[in-house]
Amino acid sequence: MKLFFILLISIAGIKNSYAQVVKDSMVMGTAVAIRDTRVDILGQKLAAYNIANHTSTTLGPGSASGYRLMVISTSDRDLAMKVRTQLLQFFPEQKLYMSYQMPNIKIEYGNFLDKSDAEKAKKQIISRKIVSNNIYVLSRTIEIKPEKKDASEKEK
C-alpha cells in the first residue's frame, strides 16, 4: 500500500512538472516611445569626457603625459611654506604638489600639456622673484579636466 501511494505521488508530481501553461503576454496594438532629452544631454557629456581622456588608457581617466615645474627643493620648511604661499597668491588657477623626500621638501607647480606653456609659467615665476634658484621643467603624468561649456552653449 505504501509503495502504491509513493508511486501515485511521484506520477502526479511528474505530470504537474510537465504541465506548464505558456501564456502569450504580447498584446496587439501600437507602442509609443517617448524620447527624454536628458538622455541626449548625458550622451553629450559622456562624449566630452571620453574626448578629454583619449590620451591613454594606461594613465587612467583624467590624466595625461605633460609637464610640471620643480620650483623648489629645500630642507628649510619655512622657506618652502613661503614659496608655496606666494605661488598660491599669484597663481591661484594652477595646482601645487608638495612632497617630502628626506631631507628635502619639494614643490611642483602646475599641470601643463605643452612644454611651451610650462616655459611661459617658469618665466612668470622668475619675473615675480618668488625663488632665487633654478626652476626645472619636469615630464610628469598630469591631471586634466574636461573644459566646461559657456552658458550660451548650455541653453542650446
Image (cartoon, rainbow, N blue to C red):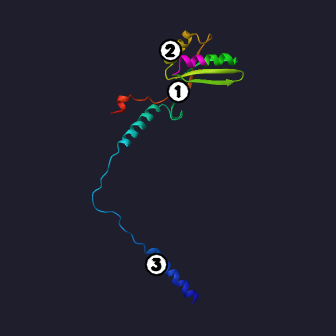
- Decide: few, some or many residues near mark 3? Use Cα within 10 Å; few <14, some 14-19, many ≥20: few
Looking at the rendering, in which quadrant would you find the C terminus?
top left
- SS class, disc 3: helix
Q: Nearer the viewer, mark 3 or mark 2?
A: 2
- SS class, disc 1: strand
- Asked whether the residues under the numbered discs 1 and 2 touch, taking CB atoms below 8 Å apart as contact, a structural biologist would say no
Could you tell me which residue is drawn at 66 percent across and 15 percent down?
Answer: 79
Tell me the kind of residue under disc 1.
Ser
Tell me the kind of residue under disc 2.
Lys
Q: Who comes first in sequence, dot 3 or dot 2?
A: 3
Tell me the kind of residue under disc 3.
Lys
- Relative horizontal placement of residue 146, taking residue 73 as reference (left or right): left
- Relative horizontal placement of residue 28, taking residue 136 as reference (left or right): left
* Residue 32 in view here: yes
Q: In this view, does 150 lie above or below 23?
A: above
Spatial CA span between label 1 and label 2: 18 Å
Could you tell me which residue is drawn at 45 percent across and 34 percent down?
Answer: 49
Q: What stretch is highlighted in magenta?
A: 85-92
Q: Where is residue 131 in the image (x, y as percent from the top left)?
A: 61, 12
Spatial CA span between label 3 and label 2: 85 Å
Q: Disc 1 marks which residue?
A: 65
- Decide: few, some or many residues near mark 2? Use Cα within 10 Å; few <14, some 14-19, many ≥20: few
Q: Who comes first in sequence, dot 1 or dot 2?
A: 1
Depth check: 155 or 67 in front?
A: 155
Q: Where is residue 137 in the image (x, y as percent from the top left)?
A: 57, 18
- Residue that protrudes farthest toward the right in the picture: 103
Q: Who comes first in sequence, dot 3 or dot 1?
A: 3
Q: In this view, does 107 lie above or below 52?
A: above
Q: Disc 3 marks which residue?
A: 15
Residue 132 disc label = none
Residue 120 disc label = 2
* Residue 137 in view here: no
